[in-house]
Image (cartoon, rainbow, N blue to C red):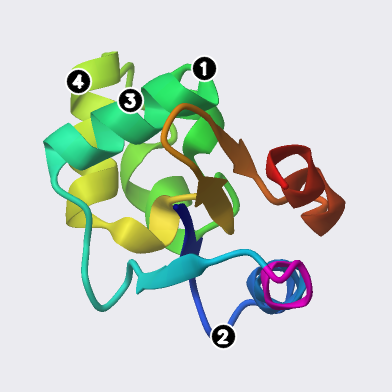
Amino acid sequence: MLRIYHNTRCKKSREGLEILENSNKEFEIREYLKEPLSEAELETLIGKLDIAPIQLVRKNEKIWKEEYKHKDLSDRELITVMVKNPKLIERPIVEDDNKAVIGRPPSEIEKLL
């Protein structure tokens, strides 16, 4: 089943949700700011995305610029930072059982449909 990691306040995330709603495929919504991911869940998701953890970080967020931008963080440390500060996770993300995509632009989601 498809799952979208969604932030209701994000326009791109809402556009991604609309693509899923129009797909007639079954999916579930996880509002990851209300229900944060564990380190294990985030590691699995990064593996499905086939990216380095730094590629999932929203580098324009204030907390990133003020607290982490100038630090040399390992992949493990980056995952811990994103778990503690879920607003740093790029959005939306859509996954199925084997793969995931970051919906930027939202049309990327169609690769999973």
| Marks 1 and 4, how far apart at CA | 15 Å
Amino acid under label 4? Arg
Return the residue at label 1.
Answer: 50
> Whole-percent x and y of residue 62?
47, 61
Amino acid under label 3? Lys
Left-right relation of 29 to 51 = left
Task: Identify which residue is drawn at 34% across, 38% down.
Answer: 68
User: SS at mark 3?
Assistant: loop
Magenta span: predominant SS is helix
| Label 1 close to label 4 by CB (< 8 Å) | no
Q: Nearer the viewer, residue 78 or 107?
A: 107
Residue range of the region highlighted in magenta in the rendering: 20-24
The nearer-to-camera label among 3 and 4 is 4
Return the residue at label 2.
Answer: 9
**Any mark on residue 71, and which?**
3
Depicted 3 relative to depicted 64: above or below: below
In primary-sequence order, the first of circles 3 and 1 is 1
Amino acid under label 2? Arg
